[in-house]
Image (cartoon, helix red, strand yellow):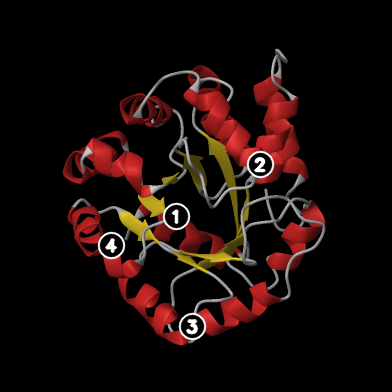
Amino acid sequence: MSRISQVFSQLKKEGRKAFVPFITAGDPDLQTTGKLLVELARAGAGVIELGVPFSDPMADGPVIQRASERALENEFGLDEIFQLIDQSRRTIDTPIILFSYFNPLLQYGLKQLCQEAKRVGLDGVLVTDLTPEEATDFSAELESHDLDMIFLIAPTSNDVRLRLVAKHASGFIYAVSRAGVTGARESVSVEAEKLVRRMRAFSDLPIVVGFGISSSSQVAEVEQYADGVVVGSAIVAEIERSKGRDDIVSHIGEFTRSLMPELKYK
């Protein structure tokens, strides 16, 4: 059983759901990212999504686009991201997944990527622009290194696609709450619950919901039907607002805790 599976299994026994924060590696800088990984784990994250900055983040809204732009100015690559994860493993054991577009991973080399990911304690990979039909080789490489392959599903996914994802996914399944790009919204789409219910007919894997979730009330709403909740843009936006603060790490930790309904999360 992978570390991700262990976390979801334990949370289920405790009657709790996974809170899954997203941050962009290198925003505002690599040193802060390393500290944030530890702080988010201590804040109660079930799984942490670490975004690989990319020059053409077509699935992301303006908040995460700006985060990628800021991070790319720091001129680093996957080797430095792996170093951060390696260092964090001295302190935390919270599952960490890479959230990336395919190009940076392909340029790095998929076999080398999986070897390094396994070495430093990464737990899985989610590639936003890689469909199950095109992921066979990469998925097999990840599996051979005991790494989870997380896929996205959307309200527009038909049953054929849901079955395909169920066949190839491991760890958990990421249900996009609505069509479109990432970004905070005032309400969660009613389509999200329908999508989770449809997916449960094809897979027993945990299902987390993300895209547009930005408040504790929305987290509480989604946790009623999903196994976990992803918050990305709201946290990244707070990092942007907090740039230059000496207490940015502790501040983001407190902000993250404020998003967690008290009765469901520690």
Q: Residue at x 74, y 50 (%)?
A: 214
Q: First in sequence: mark 1 or mark 4?
A: 1
Residue identifier under label 4:
135
- Secondary structure, mark 1, is loop
Residue identifier under label 1:
128
Q: First in sequence: mark 1 or mark 2?
A: 2
Amino acid type, mark 4? Ala
Q: CA distance from mark 1 to mark 3?
A: 18 Å
Amino acid type, mark 3? Asn
Q: Residue at x 43, y 29 (%)?
A: 88
Q: CA distance from mark 1 to mark 2?
A: 16 Å
Q: CA distance from mark 2 to mark 3?
A: 28 Å
Rate crowding at label 1 as few (under 14), some (14 to 19) or many (20 or more) other CA atoms within 10 Å: some
Q: Mark 1 touching mark 4, by CB under 8 A?
A: no
Q: Which mark is residue 59?
A: none
Q: First in sequence: mark 2 or mark 3?
A: 2
Q: Residue at x 25, y 36 (%)?
A: 108
Q: CA distance from mark 3 to mark 4?
A: 18 Å
Q: Is residue 154 above or below residue 230?
A: below
Amino acid type, mark 2? Pro
Q: First in sequence: mark 4 or mark 2?
A: 2
Would residue 211 appear left or right of 262 to someone viewing this image? left
Rate crowding at label 2 as few (under 14), some (14 to 19) or many (20 or more) other CA atoms within 10 Å: some
- Secondary structure, mark 3, is loop
Rendered location of residue 256, percent (x, y): 70, 40
